Amino acid sequence: MALSHTSDKLSPMNAVAPDLAHPRDQILDIMERIYRYRMTTTSGGNVSLLDAAGDIWITPSRVDKGGLARRDIVRLPRDGSAEGPHPPSSELPFHRAIYAARPDLRAIVHAHPVALVAFSITGRAPDTRLFPQARHMCGEPGFAPYALPGSAALGESIASVFGRGFSCVVMENHGVVVGGTTAAEAFQRFEALEFVAKTIIKAAALGGAGYLEESRIVAALDRRARWSELPPASAGSGERELRRELCDFVRRGCRQRLLISTEGSFSARLDGDRFLITPAHEDRYGLRPADIVLVRGDACEAGKIPSRAAPAHRAIYGAHPDVQAIVFAHPVNATAFSVAAAPFDARTIPESYILLRDVPRLPFGMPYGDGPALAASVSMERPAALLENDGALVVGRGILDAFDRLEVLEATAEAVINSQSIGAIAPMPDAALSEIRRAFFGEK
């Protein structure tokens, strides 16, 4: 039975105005991101949209997915004709079957991302109870038995699973297909599900992943702060520059797979108790300076909703005047440590220890509950922490400093996981660590 976590008050799409982009442009945007993130190949995958007139717009058959142009997208009017220079995707039959089985869906993404293919060839679907937001976005994934690609039998197999209420379906020995009420929602579900699959696979090298009970997931999603509205004020040049810098680094983080579109928050202190932070319910990759939210105390900019982690950011800034930037993020290797019981040891190479020091693992839910305890757990002397089933937290003396530490955290986690297939880790000895502390931290 499919599980649903798509109530109106929680859905990340509800805060977004209807997308007025042309179907061709929406499909191109999704396919470009999927290809850039290496979640499909030149010839693999397809994306479709169903518009208000009942026409289907779909990627073409056997055209380079890394170089699609607007003119390549095929329009299929309800009269059965086709408009475009190429034939439609050979998987059109299952797109049609899904739309028929689920009239609520208006967008479909199908591809062969490596982690979900790994699940598909072992006859399994990933357990999305790994993270609250992933469970909310994807629900419980379904599983469709194998049938010949492009065949009516495949369409029937997949549509029957969608018809039971699933919105994400792993296809046996094939890949995955995901539906959404909008193009953005379909992409976000697809990206979130592949992220879960990757994390589970990475965590397997660390002894396996731990999953959350449904009650803990619901409780985590229901934790939202109430904000009063700040009076309107014009932004000075310093604030404008900081907004732009935040957007640039969030986009950079998405490109480097340190952030995904539905997870994480990034903030920077403006002055005193004022800080700028990424908004809730917005695709991180597409953020603009105007989307960033100004927060002061219990108030924020009128008409905006700051990240659910904003109270945690506020607590850290209040406790540490030297902290100027904060990132909550979900890079896959560091996140694998957050869902596994294995300890994380940064004593691998000098850069890792210098930038990360000792990295604690904090209990699930702390960022949305006990602000003082969270603030006491990090500082510029302890700039990174793993959050149980919720990724990582990094602080810095500025946006670049925080981002650099996040990159090093992820690179270190990946190196440690990769080392599992080579041999036992040999951490730097105490003498080397003492030498580093004297040289870089001024300790005697």
Image (cartoon, helix red, strand yellow):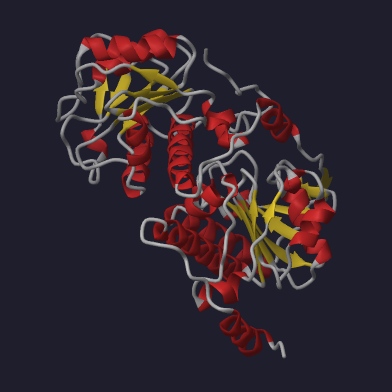
> What residue do we see at 17% from left, 29% from top?
61
Quadrant in which the C terminus appears = bottom right
Q: Is residue 377 visible?
A: yes
Percent coordinates x, y for residue 383 in the rendering: 67, 67
Foreground of the two, 361 or 222:
361
Q: Is 232 drawn above or below residue 325 in the view shown?
A: above
Count up the numbered dots.
Answer: 0
Q: Residue furthest front?
A: 424
Q: Quadrant of residue 375?
A: bottom right
Compared with 129, 96 (above or below) is: above
Percent of width and height locating residue 122: 33, 29
> Between residues 67 and 21, which one lies in front from this camera angle?
67
Q: Determine if residue 287 is in view.
A: no
Q: Is residue 442 left or right of residue 76?
A: right
426 or 415, which lies in front?
Answer: 426
**Looking at the image, which residue is at 37% across and 32% down?**
119
Left or right: where 145 falls relative to 9: left
Q: Is residue 163 above or below residue 139?
A: above
In the rendered image, residue 65, in percent from the top left (x then y), is placed at 24, 41
Q: Closest to the observer: 340 or 187?
A: 340
Residue 339 place in picture, x, y as percent: 58, 44
Is 164 located above or below residue 120 in the figure? Answer: above
